[in-house]
């Protein structure tokens, strides 16, 4: 069974913070507004993709030069617990 894509409706916080450590893009998006604009069934991945279109590294990924655009909250929200713990440890180092 294919994994169901997480949609805007699955996002449990009121705002989505996106940032890219490589190109410095950052944004804060009101999830209720996103749902109004794109529909609750829009996959979060697709939304991030839409924002990423304006980053050269996103549209032309190269080795060691990928866009890091993403939402930190997603990692905690949807990852299995042990993996999320590992991530937290990584960040603490
Ligand atoms: Zn970027």
Image: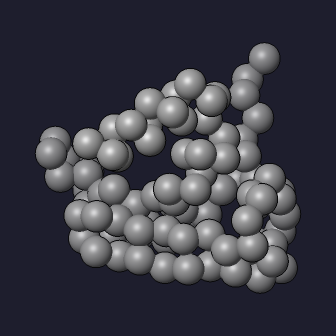
Q: Would you say 83 lies left or right of 19 here?
A: right
- Which sits in the foreground, 17 or 38? 17
Q: Position of residue 53 (x, y in %)?
A: 42, 68
Answer whether residue 34 is visible to the viewer in this image: no
Residue that protrudes farthest toward the left in the picture: 64
In the displayed structure, would residue 59 be above or below residue 16? above
- Which sits in the foreground, 29 or 58? 29
Q: Position of residue 17 (x, y in %)?
A: 54, 71
In the displayed structure, would residue 62 be above or below residue 25? above
Tally the marks.
0
Q: Residue sitting at 41 percent across and 77 percent down?
A: 26
In the displayed structure, would residue 3 be above or below residue 42? above
Q: Would you say 67 lies left or right of 32 here?
A: left
Residue that protrudes farthest toward the top in the picture: 1
Q: Residue sitting at 30 percent across and 57 percent down?
A: 67
Quarter of the figure with the C terminus: top left
Occupied quadrant, residue 69:
bottom left
Occupied quadrant, residue 2:
top right
Q: Position of residue 84 (x, y in %)?
A: 54, 35
Q: Residue sitting at 35 percent across and 65 percent down?
A: 20
Q: Would you say 59 lies left or right of 77 here?
A: left
Q: Residue sitting at 35 percent across and 76 percent down?
A: 25
User: Which colour style is shown?
Assistant: one colour
Q: Position of residue 29 (x, y in %)?
A: 62, 79
């Amino acid at each position: 069974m294919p994994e169901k894509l997480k949609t805007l409706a699955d996002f449990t916080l009121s705002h989505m913070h996106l940032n890219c450590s490589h190109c410095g893009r950052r944004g804060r998006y009101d999830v209720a507004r996103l749902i109004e604009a794109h529909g609750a069934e829009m996959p979060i991945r697709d939304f991030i993709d839409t924002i990423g279109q304006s980053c050269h590294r996103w549209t032309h990924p190269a080795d060691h030069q990928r866009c890091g655009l993403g939402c930190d909250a997603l990692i905690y929200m949807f990852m299995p617990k042990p993996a999320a713990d590992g991530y937290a440890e990584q960040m603490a180092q």
